[in-house]
Amino acid sequence: MIYLDHNATTPVDPAVAEKMAWVLREHYGNPSSIYPIGRKVKELMTEAREQVAAALGVDRGEIFFTGSGTESDNFAIFGTLDSHPDKNEFITSAIEHPAVLEAAKALEKRGVKVTYLPVDPYGTVELPALRDALTPRTALVSVMHANNEIGTIQPIDDIVRICRERDVPVHTDAVQTFGKLDLDARKLGVDLLTVSAHKIYGPKGVGALYIRKGTGICPFLRGGRQERGLRAGTENTAGIVGFGEAVRVFQEKGKKERVRVEKLAEALKKGIEEKIPRVKFNGHPERRVKSTINFAFPGLEAEAILLALATKEIYVSTGSACSEESEEVSQVLTAIGLRPEIARSCIRMSLGRDNTEEDVQTVLRELPAIVEKLRRITAFNPQD
Ligand SMILES: Cc1ncc(COP(=O)(O)O)c(C=O)c1O
């Protein structure tokens, strides 16, 4: 099998699985208990918090564990808006993950004015639109670090600079850049930053939110005093420890492994462009998470390509995993200006640690043949 859907999720690293099993088996104590078996688990969680914090260049007291990247996004958005009852405006981009877009829609229902910043054809947020949208009533700006469908990296440093002038906090969803780019939340200058464990070879159902010290935010879940009273509920201790271990592994593998995966993706991109006529690449050619490649195959339905590849045990995606079951055209591809029929022809391939040169060669053998066959049977019109 050739798995090319690492932006949807990643296989759990064996070291992570082993460490989690050890926690589940031997360290079942409640981290809130003050006797030794509770304290031991608290220690393990602290170590994980330090690992995540160090990878983001922040203090461990600024890391709050959550139940997912989605929860971290919701926590950042609702938590900030709730802490500024005098401000009722929120700015985000048109190409955010549903975890942000659906939160924005819910805010609109509450009467909050939401601005969805447009993007250019590469998927980069238009900064003049941000300048125009900011007002003294803006409570938060949330723009993702890199897009999950096309990989385009946003100019977060510019966004932060513009927002700083108006004293507006900035949140970024860094789920798709954590472990793939050098990420330093402090240098980036954001106030809030979301990460998720299952995109970095860790377990599903664990995320974290970086909250810069001094940022105004209300609790997201109310109850016990866990996560310093901001996110109540007994912690997913094995998941959190697994998250820390996943971070340790990617830090240890270092840049070399990332460069290897990026090179494979570049070879795949180049090969597709050379071997398949009339494909259209989506995303920024340079400012992009290079392991993500997205192509339109005009005249074809992406789903037909996906299913044909699946019969060869090659797994790709037609959009973000969360919208896979809906008939709707991807909001991201629409926002970069693709017509619906072109957007419906797009395939995303996201490479990861388990991919090899042989995988790339296999895809470059199978995909052109599949596209050619489908074009023949769907009476492909080259003018499309
Ligand atoms: C950019 C982005 N944000 C948020 C999420 C949601 O993360 P989780 O699956 O941990 O809820 C994803 C996952 O697809 C994502 O790609």
Image (cartoon, rainbow, N blue to C red):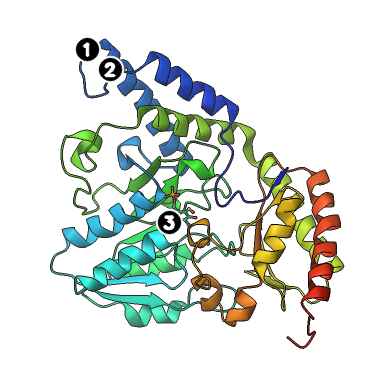
Q: What residue is drawn where x is 53% and y is 73%?
A: 329
Q: Residue furthest front?
A: 377
> What is the secondary structure assignment of the residue under circle 2?
helix
**Residue type (three-letter) at the residue carrying disc 3:** Asp
Who's the residue at 21% across and 39% down the image? 232
Q: Which residue type carries mark 2?
A: Arg
Element assignment for label 1? loop
Task: Choose between 38 and 80: the one closer to the eye.
Answer: 38
Q: For this view, does 106 lie left or right of residue 147?
A: left
- In screen coordinates, is 103 left or right of 361? left
State the image coordinates of residue 203 (x, y, percent, origin top left).
Answer: 48, 36
Quadrant housing residue 98: bottom left
**The residue at label 3 has a CB less than 8 Å from ligand 1:** yes
Nearest the camera: 134 or 92? 92
Question: Badge 1 is on which residue?
Answer: 35
Q: Which mark is residue 173?
A: 3
* Residue 326: numbered disc: none
Rendering coords of residue 88 (x, y %):
20, 72
Q: Which residue is mark 2?
A: 39
> In which quadrant will I find the C terminus?
bottom right
Instruction: Tell me the CA gap for discs 2 and 3.
Output: 32 Å
Outermost left residue: 86
Contact check, label 2 and label 1, Cβ < 8 Å: yes
